[in-house]
Amino acid sequence: MTREVVVCAGESSGDALGAGLVRELAGHADDLHFSGMGGERMRAAGVDTRIDVEELAVVGLVDVLVNYPRLRRLFRRMCDHLETTRPALLVLVDYVEFNLRLAAHAKRLGIPVLFYVSPQLWAWRSGRIRRIRRYVDAMAVLFPFETAIYERAGVPVRYVGNPLVDHVQAPEPPLRERLGVAPDTRVIGLLPGSRGGELKRHWPLLLETARRLHHRHPDLRFAVTPPPVSPRSADPDV
């Protein structure tokens, strides 16, 4: 008999984490069927995605308010999916505000909830742990110091490590060699984000910052992470 596992990620980083988790679970049990919300990586891992992360991409309070009717419809769609499938497990990957509301609905349905990736309770809005304790059955956290936070609150927790450790490796040949940058040249990484709204807002600011820094310190070089920038906005020193 097939057991249903619903996995919900709301952004690109969660899509990558969710895909890794699904592959790990599938490797330990061959009777699992995965569905939920995610992106290309989760689909490639075998998840039947009912909502794509692109539909959930919002940045900041204003963006949330503008898109609230759409987000509410998507939330209702996931609630309906939980009611229809009654999964053996609901796995929520980051995307805290949306997913904690989904956890509350799952709790009312008697569905066990695993929350993967802790919100930054140590940095801001620590009171959210009360909602987590009420609606989440177990936490899987990326950093070892996070376990103590949940243990003190009486929330079952396990440190599972950060998947980046398994994927980030020194490039061959070394990155400086590939970029044609001397070993003693100072290089600054520009990380504008992965969502469309983030790129639209952050990239012009980062690019202007890079130009000003380069004007003051001509020896500086800059590197940007994918997705690639438009040729019209590219800078020869990036």
Image (cartoon, grey):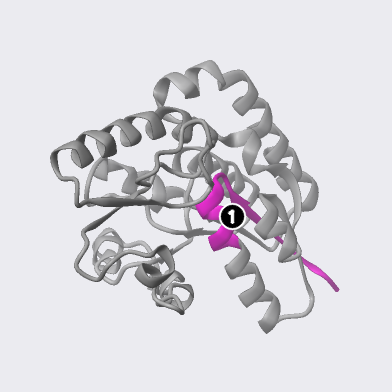
Quarter of the view holding residue 45 = bottom right
Q: Secondary structure at mark 1?
A: helix
Residue depicted at 48% across the width and 74% down the height = 167
Residue 32 lies, in percent from the top left, at: 76, 71
Q: How many marks?
A: 1
Residue 105 or residue 76, whichever sits in front:
76
Quarter of the view holding residue 24 = bottom right
Residue 196 lies, in percent from the top left, at: 54, 34
Residue 205 lies, in percent from the top left, at: 32, 30
Magenta highlight on residue 5? yes
Q: Which residue is mark 1?
A: 15
Left or right? Give the position of 223 relative to 25.
left
Residues shaded magenta:
1-18
Query: Dot 1, crowdedness within 10 Å: few (<14), some or many (≥20)?
Result: many
**What amino acid is labelled 1 in the image?**
Asp
- The quarter in which the N terminus is drawn is bottom right
